[in-house]
Amino acid sequence: MRLRAVLFDMDGTLLDTAPDFIAICQAMLAERGLPRVDDKLVRDQISGGARAMVSAAFAMSPEAPEFEALRLEFLERYQTDCAVHSTLFDGMAELLADIEKANLIWGVVTNKPVRFARPIMEQLGLSERSAVLICPDHVTKSKPDPEPLLLACKMLDLDPASVLFVGDDLRDIESGRDAGTKTAAVRYGYIHPQDNPDHWGADVVVNHPLELRRVLDDALCSC
């Protein structure tokens, strides 16, 4: 079936949001007189959410008495400063332009709550271009469940088989596969050092956003 739309995971796929997460962790450490940590330590934990990032930055178990206060502070800070340093990944602006030039639809399906996701999309000028934004707030089950992708396809009135879903986590690929979309895994995202996108069962694995141009060309030529 001919490709009609491309859906992206947000963090680590469409957008490099790591700089904002890292800046918040480093600021929280500095205000407590604690030394900076390696930025990579935080970056490697992004897929695990606030709990994993705070735990890594402060070398603290989530079961520690003071942990929950730190996690909530992190989220409060992120609510205010979620789009200060975040940007499209290198090559993604060109890819989105190619998608639009080909008269394809693109959108975002993310596990990031809408209170963070929408302001980021608006700040980066992507809200009006994106055909759909699906967050956990819109479904009963988040990725890896197929519900978010099925909802996106329903809202776009598209057969899942005509959609490509791009992500940087096994959950993305599982969600897309179970929803019936084509899937692309990216190696440039927030992938845990012990994980390997080649083992996720995606239809294609790429190292850079612009490598998806070939995937789009192949899909547009197929019937």
Image (spheres, rainbow, N blue to C red):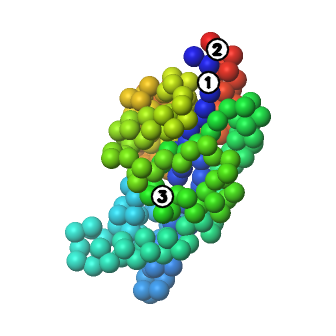
**Circles 1, 3 touching at the beta carbon (< 8 Å):** no
Q: Secondary structure at mark 2?
A: loop
The type of residue carrying mark 1 is: Leu
Residue beneath label 2, please? 222
Locate residue 17 relative to residue 101 in the image: left or right: left
The type of residue carrying mark 2 is: Ser
The answer to which of 53 and 111 lies nearer the viewer is 111
Q: Residue at x 68, y 32 (%)?
A: 104
Which disc number belongs to residue 114?
A: 3
Locate residue 63 relative to residue 86 in the image: left or right: left
Which disc number belongs to residue 3?
A: 1
Of the image marks 1 and 3, the number of the one nearer the N terminus: 1
Q: Residue at x 33, y 47 (%)?
A: 140
Of the image marks 3 and 2, the number of the one nearer the N terminus: 3
- Residue 185 appears at what percent x and percent y? 52, 35
| Mark 3 → mark 2, Cα distance in angstroms | 35 Å
Q: Nearer the viewer, mark 3 or mark 2?
A: 3
**Circles 2, 1 touching at the beta carbon (< 8 Å):** yes
Badge 2 crowding class, 10 Å Cα cut-off, few under 14, some 14 to 19, many 20 or more, is few
**Circles 3, 2 touching at the beta carbon (< 8 Å):** no
Which disc number belongs to residue 146?
A: none
Look at the image and tell me in which quarter the C terminus lies: top right
The answer to which of 131 and 205 lies nearer the viewer is 131
- Residue 149 appears at what percent x and percent y? 45, 37
Look at the image and tell me in which quarter the N terminus lies: top right
The answer to which of 199 and 158 lies nearer the viewer is 158
| Mark 2 → mark 1, Cα distance in angstroms | 8 Å
